[in-house]
Image: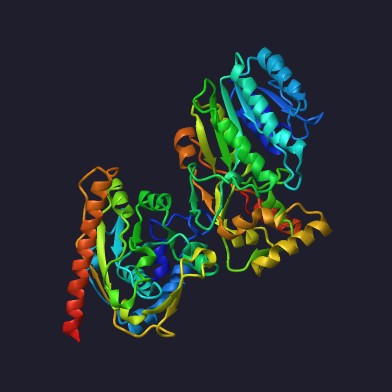
Amino acid sequence: MSFESHAQRPPFYDEGYGFDLFGLHPPAVERAVAAGAPFYDHYFRVDSRGVEQIPETGPAILVANHGGVLPLDAAMLCLDVLRQTRRLPRAIADHFVPRLPIVGTLFARIGVVSGARRNVERLLERGELVAIWPEGVTGPAKPFRSRYQIQQWRVGFAELAIRYRAPVIPAAVVGAEESWPMAKKLPGLRWFGVPYMPIPAFPVPLPTKLYIRYGQPIRFDRVAADDPAVVAEEAHRVRVAIEQLIDETREERRRDQ
Amino acid sequence: MNVLVTGATTPLGAAIVDELQRTSAAFVLAVGHEPCATYLHPGERVEYHSLDLTRPRSVHDLLWGPTRDHAIDTIIHLAQHRRVGDSGSRIHAQNVGATREMLLGAMEHPTIRRFIYRSFSDVYALRHTTTELIDEEAPLDFEPQAPQWVRDRVEADTLVSAHFGSRLQVAVLRCVEILASDVGSQLWDYLQSRVCLRPLGFDPMINVLSLADAAIAFTAAAGSTETGVFNIVGADTLPLSRAIEESVRIEIPVPGPLMAPLYNLRRSLAGFEFNYQMNLRRFHFGGVLDGTRAAERLGYVPQHHVEWPRPWWRMLIDRLTALRLAPQ
């Protein structure tokens, strides 16, 4: 089955011209998948387990750790879900990303949406799978010595998960931090709202093997989406689950080597 | 339901009057500035008055004369200046002053119970932090450097919105751009060129509204008792590049800084109205209005696609194809 047919399966909401409200265009997804396949199969040799934890239908939130100078981990995670399930994850990016020239348009065509509450609500209302990296830019911005240590942890996803009764699937990506670490960041350059300009340690990412692991879906039974304490507690549960997954996966990687 | 429609000589005003006539037994008091109504179709239940709404005395006479005599209960206020490039106190008087006079008059009026104001999606502030989906709570553009076109609309919108909860049922309909001729559409003017320049690296999503859908939305609002702000969206949501393609134009991506000088030159030489500075943020950041509230509370769902401003030869081919495909 082609990836275009994956992407055109419900819930792709065509607004009448082959694009959805956010600019998603299935042929662009197909091209992106074709372009990413050699990296997935041969360069990063992605080793994935547990993708069956993602529900086949209905609203769901995929939450993962974030690292590396550019979001290659996010790209490989989305590619992994697309290749192994029938679902197109809608990656939620920081506000500035969809507004970047060229990149913003390309990302919009493959389903990336900016991390605004109303956007995510609309996607969940439509029963889509949303992929969120609650660390935001603090994940890729951390120094190499802090690799695999979760940074700032935004909690908005937990509130929406409670409100929309969406299961949260924790995921860990191991290998991206070593693949393309950051040498330096230039905070002075703030074009198009970019918080800093990253200087990678290597001109291209190293071909490290990527390990992707999915945990058991976490369901929130509580209904107090407006209670900040409850939301913070549930978000922390997810963080702990991801930290556990990271530790287990790193241990597994050590055994492999 | 008896309705007073200001700006009734515009294509939108005339479409609303037609829709009111078609769907209800409403008596319509149509008001316009022009001595004769170009687009308006006469009818038994339509009465046309020509007057200048920028004069408070005219507004007073309208409200306490024919409006009271015909027991008008709903005002649909559309009278806004349409030419983007115009500015000055007279334009402000029409956009804001007339709205204020109409609103204050309606507050004291014995028969008017509902005031529907036509606002614009231009009132929303578009920044690099603006989300793709803009709901009614999104921040408005209060920038003092904004052109008068925007400032007037924001001022009038907030002026009307300040009366939510008063004895008058107030509804503000923030419409996305109506893509039609003679309605002040910047995009329509932009798509008139054989060659359309697009900022390199940006292809924002846009949403456009047809006249028919706009008329349906206002008619639905007139027949409802709901108050508040409602985004009125169209049935066509697509990237700018696709809109250019639909209009059978040639698209050339151009570095952003060159766009304004080139379109200023076009305006000076060919007399077009499209002003790139006015549309700069929309052409870079896009943003599509969220019409959920209007769907849920007014029952308005867009159904009619716009007619793209295609060249004559393409329209001829489309017509012939349609005739050939039509059942005998």
Q: Which quadrant of the figure has residue B61?
A: top right
In-front residue for pair A85/A90: A90
Is B5 on the left or on the right of A44, as rendered? Answer: right
**Residue furthest bottom as drawn:** A257
Q: At 71% from the left edge and 24% from the top edge, which residue is drawn?
A: B43
Q: Which quadrant of the figure has residue A235?
A: bottom left
Residue A111, percent from left and from top: 43, 63
In-front residue for pair A195/A9: A195
Q: Is residue B183 above or below residue B22?
A: below
Is residue B2 visible to us here? no
Q: How many marks?
A: 0
Q: At 70% from the left edge and 53% from the top edge, which residue is drawn?
A: B309
Q: Which quadrant of the figure has residue A69?
A: bottom left
Q: Quadrant of the C terminus of chain A?
A: bottom left
Is B71 on the left or on the right of A59, as rendered? Answer: right
Residue A250, percent from left and from top: 21, 77
Q: Is residue B187 above or below residue A257?
A: above
Residue B307, percent from left and from top: 65, 49
Q: Quadrant of the N terminus of chain A?
A: bottom left
Q: Is residue B120 above or below residue B261?
A: above
Residue A61, percent from left and from top: 30, 57
Is residue A48 visible to us here? yes
In-front residue for pair A2/A94: A94
Q: At 38% from the left edge and 56% from the top edge, which residue is drawn?
A: A11
